[in-house]
Amino acid sequence: MTSVNCLSTGVAVVKLELAKMRRYRRGGRTLRRLLLGGNPALVIGLNLPFLVVASVSLRAAAAVTLELLLVHMGTLAVMLTVRRAQGGAVRLATQVAVSTLLTVWARLLVIRLFGSAAGTLGMFLYLMAVNGMTLTGGAAIGARHKPGRVLVGGLLQVGGFALAIALLALAREYAGYNTLWGVPLPATFRLSGVTAPFFGLILAGFLLGAGRFAGKAVAGARMRERARREARFLVVRDERHG
Amino acid sequence: MKLIQQPAPHIRVAQTTRGVMGDAVAALGFLYAMAYYYHGPRAPVLGLGSVAVCLACDVACNFITRGGHNIRDLSAIVTGLLLPLMMPATVGYGVVATAGLFAMLVAKAPFGGTGHNVFNPAAAGFSFAVVCFGGSLFLYPPPAFKAPVWGPSDAVLAASPAFTLRMGGTPGYDITDMLVGNYPGPMGATNILVLAACLLYLVFRGTVRWSMPFSFFATVGVLAWLFPRSAAGGLSSVGFELATGLLLFGGIFLLGDPVTTPKREMSKVAFGITAGAVVMLFRHFGRQEEELTFALLLMNAAVWGFDMAGERVASIIRRRKRKEH
Amino acid sequence: MPMFSKGIVLAQHKEPAFSKPALRFVNPQTDTIRLDVKGIAVQTKEEAIIEIAKLAQIVDERDGRLLHRKLMRAQGRAKIVIADAVDDEPFVSSRVGPLLQLTDEVADGLELCCDVAGCADRLIMVYKNVTDLQTRIPRSLKKIKVMRVRGGYPADQTRRLRRLGDMPRLIVGVGALIHLARAVYEHKKQSTVFVTVAGNCVSNPVNLEVSIGMRVSQVLDRCGLHAEPTRVVCGGSMTGISIMDAENTLVTFTTKAILASRENERDAHYTCIGCGRCEQACPAGLNPMYIHRFVQNSYYANLRPFDAQLCIGCGTCSYVCPSKLDVAPAVAVAREYALRSFAAPADPDADDAEQMETPGERKARRTAEKQAKAAAAKERRQEKSARRAADKAAAKAGREAEAARREAETEAKKATVEALRQAAEQAKAKEAQKAADAKAPTEAAPPVQTEEGAAPETLAQTEERGETGEPAPDADAAPVQPPDAGAAPLDIRGLMKELERVNAAEEAAEDKPAEDAAPTEPDKAGGEPEPDADAVPVQTARSQVDIALAELEQSLERAMASKPKPKPRPKRTPRPGPEANTAAGEEKQ
């Protein structure tokens, strides 16, 4: 049996073992959670409007990310402390109150830090408070998992959102205003349509597609690697027997 | 004798997709001839540039996705030819290229390429150009102005009658000028007579079904007669609404796109009527002077619903027919 | 607005084959077989014709049915006999060609069919939309009228016939008529079939009379091939079957054409642009474009409103497709799926039978069908409602019985507990030491059987004898604990509650019959008869009380352990008895 044959046999074997494949898909979980899997911007549709509206400039994107970080992590932390509270109503009320308060505080902070860029966001920051609540599902998460895991998951979510919004904001600010972080850059062409909300949606769609493609590519690479290993094993075993 | 097993039927009609698209290309060729007559060589050069961009995008996307589509079907060329005809003759090459890129890379390829696109690529590309370049797309050179192929033109740009209508006025062009396209307007959309000839050609070739453009135009006419925008009112309002802007052009070439319209005859009629109503709503309440492409994009999203409703009705009819047969 | 298409007009390409004289290409061994008609013993001419058709094994090439069956069905009923020469598929002229060249035999065959049917009307049907013929088809042949069927492909003959008058009719293909005439007048068995050989690779397209069983390659060689074909088709150009091995495929009764062609491969792999031509062309009013798309993407669940089961398999959708997609096979797949999963298949014999009906009969049949359907539906409805009512009644009776049983049970338990309490009180009050009869039956110690009816009686006995004054253990105390004379009063209500709860749990767990609801027997199998049921009344009062109390305590313990289902105890272990016994013994000492 030639090694080529062995390789193809190994590939066939691996292709048949669908259940085993799933195990190997689990590999790149952290990376993909950071990028897409737990990315609130792309997975949870409620956060998509913020992504689309706020990603017109890098400053605004940074403001929204900071806001999300403060509100999300703060709410999560508080919810972890009241996780054992009796009754869902108490938890819900706490959550709403905490996230609203955090939003007000975060907004003041963001306005001080980013000035006019934060001002253009208008009511979206306030919406973020309620949305952040929906997003975290704080009570449920807090009740089910360990505190450390919840906090790391929240951070990863914020990171994924930051990554997505940064990419979009980079492209849209440069193409739409020919600036980056407010600094004018030389450019020959300017597409003001890029700053329109629908184009943000389209770009988000492309980002999602690219993410899926990347995920599939990673999984495929891992599977091929596994197939190669199996094939090598088959060759060795064949030599030993024959 | 090496034989391949093939499913029946074993003969095929001579017409191909390439032929269907070729009909549209031929019809658009007439319009380019008229544009050349009015605006000089810049018009065909714009068309060629747009076609080059669209074709390159199509080939590249096909290569990347390994779609295995037959590039010979000319669909990218039709899109490329449509785009400049909706714009003024003095439009920049960059604008046309942007519209073409958007049409192919955003509106067509991600949905699966030819035959799978939900939105009409040309309409999407033009809409994107309108969003990006706004007002400059609605300022047209005078009809006899020969635009230079390269470099800036020194034409005195003017608004089209569509703008006058939107402001509530009455365009000051007589009916002959409107028919032969002797007024400032989009390159391909002003020559009413040529457009009508194109429509007849396409209908007789079977490329465009008569039902949809005619129901569309009829709806627009009725609505224009009932709710005139200009002070003139009545029948002259109908004439102006039909003749100005992209209405006729869009009704023939954008609405005639088979991919993004319903398939069954009655669905086509219903679609044409609804599209006419939506277009008139956009004209009455829209912000820009020409938002036909936006209205069509909106309608494109509803094609599936129209098809399904038509299929339900057809199902009832054919079951009844079968029963009595 | 015409709702559904009446078919498409095809370029017919019949010509080189149609006008050439039909040739014979036969196997002499089979061609000379003669029928033995001597043995036929029949009364009438009609029966003789049918018998000869049966002996000659004539097959109607139009629908592949045996001719004598069709004749038997039409005997004395059909009002008109029609010779079918409607060759609506391009390239094919294997019926209309012989019609013009063997007119005498066709006329003879028609005459014979008319004799069988007992009618005088006869007709020849040909296809009208053939423009490229060099030979003119006359208005009448041998004084038989030639009717032209209009319309595109597929030709709709029924509509034309309906205009002619709706009467019982016998439609026979031209080939079968010729073979019938030969069988009757020349005693020839059907050994040949008329075949058109054509296609763009065939040098001499011609109508051939070929022996059945000839190889397809032989037939093609007979006509000559000037190019290597990529596709050889047995059957019509629209509905035929493309074969892979011409050497080993034989000519059959229903082979109407053999086509060899070579095609251009450049116009392939276009994608569907949704032009809607297939939907406009479909004679059944289907939407092949969406059906094709769903089948391609395996969205079979979406197929239901598309009525793919109505497809007639004409192949028009594939023919008109400008993208050259294989639409028709996809629709065929969808049709199979529809017939398998949600649509009733059509009766293949119904069409044949329908042709023999007069309008009155058809109407009557339809009315009867409708009535039968309505009656069946009504019956179903009634049956359903009756079943529902019966279910309801049964459920009600069951509920009532259950309620009665529960009530009786509760009563019995109340009585038991009351009796126990009384016995305990009496025992406490008197403190008598008469235990002479106490130990008698306890080693057998069957679990106590308190049947609904029996329990009060037994306890009445207990009460009666209890007056003699015997000590009963305190219910609060565990069996191992010494008796406490001045203990707190019994928590009867709590005990009762626990008892009931445990019993309910046990019943639910074991699904016992109602009569068997013994509170102390949770581990018994349902229908098993109790061996010691009779022994209960003869037990002494002392042991009864002991056992019952021990039982109570055990159930209490079980309830305290809060197990949802009681653990099945070891099978026949008389646990309560000895335990109670020891308790009693300890208590005594």
Image (cartoon, rainbow, N blue to C red):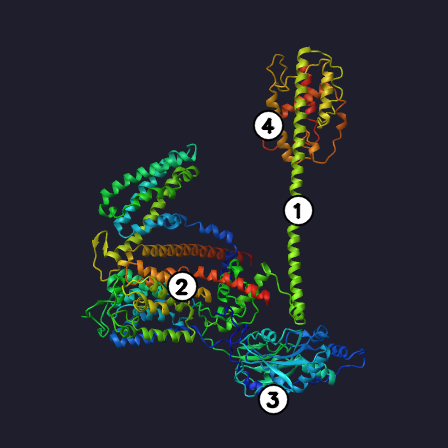
Q: Do labels 1 and 4 share a chain?
A: yes
Q: Residue under circle 2?
A: B273
Q: How far apart are marks 1 and 4 (CA)?
A: 42 Å
Residue type of the residue flagged with mark 2: Ile
Residue type of the residue flagged with mark 4: Ala
Q: Are marks 4 and 2 on the same chain?
A: no
Q: Is mark 2 on a helix, strand or loop?
A: helix
Q: Residue under circle 1?
A: C387
Between label 1 and label 3, give the one nearer the viewer: 1
Q: Residue under circle 4?
A: C559
Would you place residue C398 above or below residue B287 in this image?
Answer: above
Q: How many marks?
A: 4
Q: Residue under circle 3?
A: C21
Determine which quarter of the picture holds residue B237. bottom left
Would you place residue C46 above or below residue C450 in this image?
Answer: below
Q: Are marks 4 and 3 on the same chain?
A: yes
Q: What element carries label 1?
A: helix
Give the position of the C terminus of chain B as an image quadrant.
Answer: bottom right
Callout 4: chain: C
Q: Which residue lies furthest to the left in this view?
A: B154
Q: Nearer the viewer, residue A188 or A127?
A: A127
